[in-house]
């Protein structure tokens, strides 16, 4: 009896439309009208997040230790999900939840897959973000700097 993969699901676990925005930042930065709905230029390379939902999402995604460990593990090279879980050294269930959230948000994407000797596909994943920096000013505005990876 085949078991269902707990990582990749058809239904996103976060239903807000802003979650997919992060995964499309590379395209969005060239559409100034859409980009300005979420960000305003703060200074060179820095953007103030003007959308309340997106601010909350960014803080949630990147202030979590397990999410940071996942993203850090993907800096050097794409990894399979079992490799990510092993490197994170956190509870397996919590790590799987964060991986799902990062996949649903588009921050972690499928890189490729290989076939095992039994003919099963093993997917490897990469992060579209090399580096992120989040700052709060005195007014509690969120400033975000992203360094996006090319696949």
Image: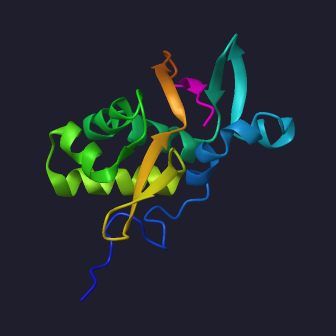
Comparing 132 with 73, the one in front is: 73
The quadrant holding residue 86 is top left
**Residue 85 is inside the magenta segment:** no
Seen at 52% across and 65% down, the residue is 15
| Magenta span of residues | 140-151
**Residue 145 is inside the magenta segment:** yes
Drawn side of residue 122 relative to residue 43, left or right: left
Seen at 63% across and 41% down, the residue is 51
Drawn side of residue 54 relative to residue 124, left or right: right
Seen at 63% across and 32% down, the residue is 150
The reply to whether residue 75 is visible in this rendering is yes
Q: Which x, y percent locates residue 84?
A: 29, 44
The quadrant holding residue 76 is top left
Q: Which x, y percent locates residue 103?
A: 46, 53
Q: Which x, y percent locates residue 147?
A: 58, 23
In the rendered view, tell whether residue 74 sits above or below residue 44: below
Residue that lies at the very extreme toward the front in this rendered image:
117
Comparing 59 with 114, the one in front is: 114
In the rendered view, tell whether residue 123 sits above or below residue 149: below
Seen at 56% across and 43% down, the residue is 54
Drawn side of residue 94 relative to residue 56, left or right: left
Which image quarter holds the N terminus?
Answer: bottom left
The reply to whether residue 140 is visible in this rendering is no
Colour scheme of the rendered structure? rainbow
Residue that lies at the very extreme toward the top in this rendered image:
44
Count every numbered label the image shows and give the total: 0
Q: Which x, y percent locates residue 99?
A: 35, 51
């Amino acid at each position: 009896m085949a078991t269902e993969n707990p990582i990749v699901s058809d239904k996103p676990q976060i239903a807000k439309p802003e979650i997919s925005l992060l995964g499309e930042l590379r395209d969005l930065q060239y559409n100034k009208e859409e980009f300005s709905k979420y960000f305003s230029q703060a200074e060179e390379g820095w953007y103030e997040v003007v959308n309340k939902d997106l601010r909350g999402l960014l803080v949630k995604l990147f202030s979590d230790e397990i999410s940071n460990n996942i993203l850090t593990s993907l800096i050097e090279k794409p990894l399979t999900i079992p490799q990510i879980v092993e490197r994170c050294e956190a509870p397996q269930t919590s790590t799987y939840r964060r991986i799902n959230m990062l996949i649903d948000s588009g921050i972690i994407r499928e890189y490729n897959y290989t076939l095992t000797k039994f003919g099963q596909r093993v997917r490897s994943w990469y992060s579209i973000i090399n580096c992120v920096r989040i700052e709060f000013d005195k007014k509690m505005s969120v400033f975000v700097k992203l360094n996006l990876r090319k696949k």
